[in-house]
Image (cartoon, helix red, strand yellow):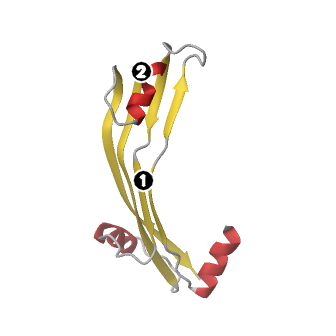
Amino acid sequence: LVEAWKEKAATKASWVIDIDIQAPVVLIPEKCNDPRASVLIFDLGHLKLKYGKIESSTRVVAWFQGHPRAEDDVTLDSGTLAINDLTFQIARASDWRLSAKGNSIQGSSVIDPISLSLDLGVETVA
């Protein structure tokens, strides 16, 4: 990956990444052989990543303009990262399948569904 990045910088190529996935659900059981045992449920929600050949956020551009580099030949690539419906629950092992199907379960929600969004910029010096 490092060599590919160096080649990208030398040739001034643009990379485009567009990922839109339903992120995994991670289960950590208290006991593997007891269906009544507690289980931690990490639902990582919906992940979207876009990088390259997208319009830069005005705040990202302003930050880079406020922190200029000494080099003249600098390229700015922009991206966005969004995670939606991130949750963390504690429930019974026998109930986790209901949660995976979108049904409500009897359990304790440690983190209610939250969403995170991040605009980013990466400078490349040729």
The disc, 2 or 1, on the residue closer to the chain's N-terminal end is: 1
Amino acid found under the numbered disc labelled 1? Leu
82 on left or right of 5: left
Foreground of the two, 56 or 23: 23
55 vs 97: above or below: below
Which quarter of the figure has residue 59?
A: bottom left
Q: Is residue 106 above or below residue 122?
A: above
123 left or right of 64 in image = right
At x 35%, y 68%, the residue is: 60
Image location of residue 11, percent across then percent down: 61, 87
- The residue labelled by disc 1 is 47
In 3D space, how far apart are the residues under numbered discs 2 and 1 (Cα atoms)? 24 Å
Q: Residues within 10 Å of mark 1 (few under 14, many from 20)?
A: some
Q: Quadrant of the N terminus?
A: bottom right
Which quadrant of the view contains residue 3?
bottom right
Residue 113, relative to residue 48: is it above or below?
above
Relative depth, front residue between 80 and 72:
80
Q: Is residue 96 above or below residue 113?
A: above
Percent position of residue 80, x then y: 39, 63
Q: Residues within 10 Å of mark 2 (few under 14, many from 20)?
A: many
Label disc, if present, on residue 4 of the rendered structure: none
Q: Nearer the viewer, residue 8 or 109?
A: 109
Q: Which mark is residue 91?
A: 2
At 29% from the left and 71% from the top, the residue drawn is 58
Residue 32: image location, x then y, percent: 60, 19
1 and 42: which is toward the camera: 42
Residue at 53 percent across and 82 percent down: it is 71
User: Residue drawn at (46%, 20%), measured in percent from left and top?
Assistant: 94
Q: Amino acid at mark 2?
A: Ala
Q: Secondary structure at mark 2?
A: strand
Q: Position of residue 104 (x, y in %)?
A: 31, 28
